[in-house]
Amino acid sequence: MFDLFRIALRGLLHRKKRSWLTIIGVLIGITAVVALISLGISMQLAVERSFEDLGYDVMMIFPGEVGGGFGGPTSLTASFEIDLDALSRVEGVGEIGLISYQSVYVKADGNEGFLDALGVSGNIFDFFKLEVEGRRFGPDERDAVVLGSEVAKELGLGVGDILEIEGHPFTVVGIYSAEDRLNVRGESILMPLAAMRELLGIKGVSMVLVRARPGYDVGEVAKRVEEFLYKSRGRRDLSVQTMEEIHEAVQRALGILRAFLGGIAGISLLVGGIGVMNTMYTAVLERTREIGVMKAVGARNSQILLIFLLESGLMGLVGGALGTVIGALLNVVAVIAARASLGAKVLEFGIPWWLVVGALGFSFLVGCLAGLLPARSAAKLDPVEALRYE
C-alpha cells in the first residue's frame, strides 16, 4: 500500500504546475463551502446567544398577527393599550416589561435629527441584561435617559451630559453596550416610559414582555394570556409568541439560508471536481506506457485503479485542506469586520470541528469520485497496446 501511495505522490510531483492548477479549483470550491457554511453557523450562534440572554421563559405581546418574517412583530410603530393589573393576575404570569417605540427629534452639541427612542419600564434592563456604564434611571425619574453606545458616540455625549428631546432637556445618566439584544440596539435612546408618555402625549405601548413564573410551562402560560386578551378585548388584535417559537422560526430561516449558501458553494466544488477528472484523463494518456510496464511486471488492475484514485484523492485532499484554512480565515475576518463596523457581537466565530473534518473528507471523496472513471480506463488498458503507445 505504501508503494502505491508513493507512486501516486510521484505522479503529482512530476507535473507540479498542472497539479497545482487542479488543486486550486478544488481549493476555491472548499473555501466557498467552508466560508459560507461557517458564516451561517456564526449567524446561528449569535441568534442563539441573544435568545439565551433574554430567556426562553419570556413571551411577547404585540399588535397584529404572527408572521413578520422571522415570526416576530411586523412593526414596533403600532401601539395598543392593555390592562396590566388584570394581566398580572393570569395564572403563571410573573414579571411584566413594557416598551414603546417612537422616533423623536434630538439636539445635542450642534447635532440634531430624528433618532429611535424606546420608552421602557425600569425592569427592561434586567429583561435584556443590558450592561450600563453609569446608572439606570429610576421609576420616578422624568428627565433621565440611557443612551446606546453608538448614539453616544454619534452625538459626542457622555454620562452627565445634556441633550434635548422634542425641545425638553434630559440628562444622560448611563450608556449601555452596543450588543444587539433582539430589538434593543446600540442605536437607540432608552427613556422612562412615563416620561415619553408625558412628552409625546401617548398612552399605549408597542410591546409587552411577560416572563412566566418559575415552575410554569411558558407555552401553557402563553395560551392563558391569549385567552385573557381575547376575553378582555373581544377580538384577536394582539398576538402572543414565546421566545421558543420565535427561536424555532429563526432557526428554520437560517437553515434555509445555510442550505442555499451551501448549494452555491457546491457548484464551485463541482467545477473543481471536473478539473480533477480532466487532469486525471490527461495523466492516463501521458502515462500509458508506464501503465503497460507496471502491468507487464505483474501489477494487477486493482492496483492500477488504486494508484490513480489515490492520486486524484490527494489532489482533492490538498485542495480541501488549503480551502478549509482559507475559509476559516475568511470567517474570522468577517466576524471581526462585523463587530468593528457594527460595534456589536452580531456574529460569533463558527468553525466547528465537524465542518473541518467534513470538508477534508468531502474534498478527498470528490477527488476520488472525479478520478474514478479515468482510473478505471487506466486499469482496463491492454498491457501490449499500452507498451506500443507513443
Image (spheres, helix red, strand yellow):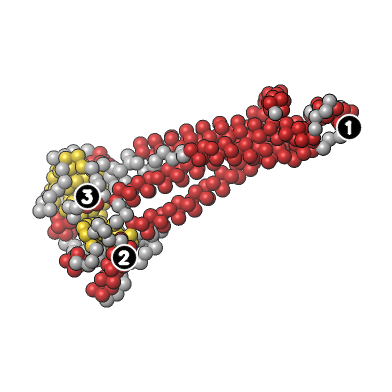
Left or right of 189? Residue 169 is left
| Mark number, residue 171 | none
Name the residue located 57 percent from the left edge and 36 percent from the top edge. 360
Vertical position of residue 219 compared to residue 251: above or below: below
Query: Crowding near pointer 3: few (<14 within 10 Å), some, many (20+)?
Result: few
Name the residue located 59 percent from the left edge and 40 percent from the top edge. 362
Q: Is residue 8 visible?
A: no
State the CA–CA distance, disc 1 to disc 3: 82 Å
Name the residue located 27 percent from the left edge and 61 percent from the top edge. 216
Left or right of 140? Residue 8 is right
State the CA–CA distance, disc 1 to disc 2: 79 Å
- Residue kind at label 1, given as amino acid type: Glu
Name the quarter where the N terminus is drawn.
Answer: top right
Foreground: disc 3 or disc 2: 2
- Whichever of callouts 1 and 2 sits on the residue coming sooner in the sequence is 2
Mark 2 sits on what residue?
Answer: 220
- Whichever of callouts 3 and 2 sits on the residue coming sooner in the sequence is 3
- Residue 120 coordinates in the image, percent (x, y): 20, 54
Q: Check contact, mark 3 vs mark 2: CB within 8 A.
A: no
- Residue kind at label 2, given as amino acid type: Glu
Vertical position of residue 19 compared to residue 198: above or below: above
SS under mark 3: helix
Mark 1 sits on what residue?
Answer: 385
SS under mark 2: helix
Mark 3 sits on what residue?
Answer: 126
Name the residue located 46 percent from the left edge and 38 percent from the top edge. 351
